[in-house]
Image: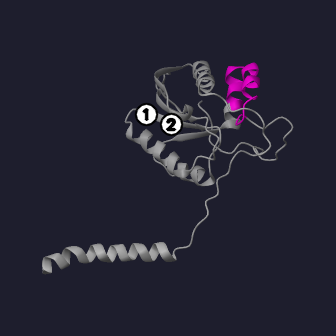
Amino acid sequence: MIILFVMLAPLVTGLLLILVIARFAPNVQRETHGLSGAEGDARPEITSDEFGDVLQELVDSLALEVVFSSIGTGGVVEMTLRDLKPLSGGRILLCATPVLGGAVDSVEVLGFAEGVRADMGALKGIYVALAGFSDEAKTAVRGTPAPVDLIDGHELLELVRTQVSPERAAECAVYRGFGNAPGVLTTTGPQSRASGPE
């Protein structure tokens, strides 16, 4: 009987503690920062195939070798790249999502950073999100042991403009998530401070 009490007492105590916390804890609203000017943006979303093609062209223009590439659910592109430069080159992990449902939060960014850290040969990770990143994600990525660059839609459009061609950037600008909608003026710049691949 004493053994049964010793086994069940912590479970009952833990359950009661969970119920008290659930009952009296305040609800905290999470703010997700979407794209600026996205409310009145009538442009279509980019297809997963077109998004993969844009990334492939950018990777090719940066002279990176694609070791592995896949397009998953929702058009999420995952690539393992190799920079062939002697001494400074190495493996780069890239994760890119065209989903515009809301800014990528810190949980997703930290999960990706952990994957980069766990991959013993990875030089760094690049996370591309057309919807941008929450302030929590931008703060959290600075504290990760693995170097991860965050690139939002504005920065991706600028990379395509400078590394691929201005014509290709103009083709991308017709889709939501790549820069501002025509006629929408904003005073803020790109959402993340991280730079693209060098």
Q: CA distance from mark 1 to mark 2?
A: 8 Å
Tell me if mark 2 has few (under 14), some (14-19) or many (20+) residues whose alpha carbon lies within 10 angstroms of its own.
many
Residue 61 vertical placement versus 115 (above, below): above
Task: Indicate left or right for 58 with 77 as reference.
Answer: right
Q: Quadrant of the C terminus?
A: top right
Residue at point 39%, 76% (across, down): 17
Disc number for residue 125: 2
* Residue 153 in the image, given as x and y percentages of width and height: 68, 36
Task: Report the number of discs.
Answer: 2
> In the rendered structure, are the residues bearing label 1 and label 2 in contact, judged by CB atoms less than 8 Å apart?
yes
| Circle 1 SS class | strand
Q: Which residues are magenta?
A: 157-178
Disc number for residue 122: 1
* Residue 12 in the image, given as x and y percentages of width and height: 30, 76
Task: Indicate left or right for 80 with 43 as reference.
Answer: left
Q: Looking at the magenta stretch, what is its main secondary structure?
A: helix
Question: Label 2 amino acid?
Answer: Gly
Residue at point 72%, 35% (across, down): 176
Residue at point 75%, 46% (across, down): 36
Residue 47 vertical placement versus 113 (above, below): above
Residue 25 vertical placement versus 142 (above, below): below
* Residue 189 in the image, given as x and y percentages of width and height: 75, 44
Q: Quadrant of the N terminus?
A: bottom left
Residue 86 lies in magenta, yes or no? no
